[in-house]
Image (cartoon, rainbow, N blue to C red):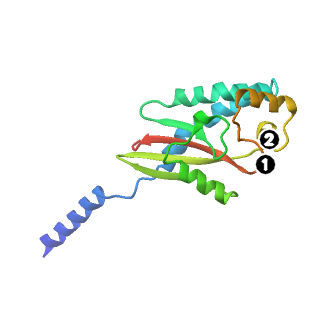
Amino acid sequence: MKTRYLFILLLAFILSSCFGPEYDPAPKGAELLAPLKANLKTALISGMAGGPADAIAVCKTEAPRIAGELSVDGVVMGRSSHKLRNHANVAPAWVTPIIVTYAANGGALTPTGVDLGGGRYGYVEPIMTQPLCLSCHGSSLHPDIAAKIGELYPDDQATGFSEGDFRGVFWVEFQAGP
């Protein structure tokens, strides 16, 4: 009887080790996205020193460069939106339903983790429109800013936002692990 009890205990321990708690991609996803968000904010603030028209050019060149530099060792990251400015920022297939859900829900949105299979995970954080964003993404743009956006992004859809609106997402794909 005692041997049977020990066997069941041992089996339970082994099974719990094999099928432990589900992996939560949020902590690692947030950690991986932090430098993208910080570096992009720094670049935009620096660009705004020359005015919003300069910030548009900085965003066009620096945002993809920053995301590219941080997309290493199996990590891939970027930004996307339901209203794209730069069509190079089309969301990966797994991100699109999250964007649709965020756009439909508006308001208070929470980050989302996704099991992509094969030990890969995705993590998405909503971007909410801040006052600084309105210079280039608001409902009423200065004519110089509108002209610069039209020049750099002829198919722009990323205007008409108000403070607090859902603007888009930061997303990251990565392998599970430390």
Q: Looking at the picture, does residue 66 appear above or below residue 102? A: above
Across and down, in percent, residue 97 comes to 54, 53
User: Where does label 2 land, which residue?
Assistant: 134
Point 59% across, 36% down: residue = 89
Asked if the residues shown at circle 2 and circle 1 are in contact, with their CB atoms under 8 angstroms apart, the answer is yes
**Which of the 4 image quadrants contains residue 36?**
top right
Quadrant containing the C terminus in the rendered view: top left
| Residue displayed at 79% across by 49% down | 162
Q: Is residue 136 left or right of residue 13?
A: right
Figure quadrant of residue 174:
top left
Image coordinates of residue 146 in percent, x first then y, are 81, 33
Say which of 6 and 97 sits in front: 97
Q: Residue furthest bottom?
A: 1
The residue positioned 31% from the left and 58% from the top of the image is 19
Give the left or right position of residue 14, taking residue 140 as reference: left
Judge whether residue 61 can be spotted in this image: yes
Identify the residue at horizontal 65%, vertical 45% (top origin): 168
Task: Give the Cα separation between the discs numbered 2 and 1.
Answer: 7 Å
| Nearer the observer, 5 or 143 | 143
Quadrant in which the N terminus appears: bottom left
Q: Above or below — where is 113 with respect to 16? A: above
Q: Secondary structure at mark 2?
A: helix
Q: Horizontal placement of 174 versus 137: left or right? A: left
Above/below status of 44 relative to 122? above
Q: Amino acid at mark 2?
A: Leu
In x, y percent, where is residue 21?
A: 38, 58
Question: In terms of sequence position, does the residue under pointer 2 or pointer 1 come before the other?
Answer: 2
Examine the rendered structure and indicate whether residue 63 appears above or below residue 105.
above
Q: Which residue is mark 1?
A: 163
Q: Nearer the viewer, residue 160 or 17?
A: 160
Q: Amino acid at mark 1?
A: Glu
Q: Position of residue 26 (x, y in %)?
A: 51, 49
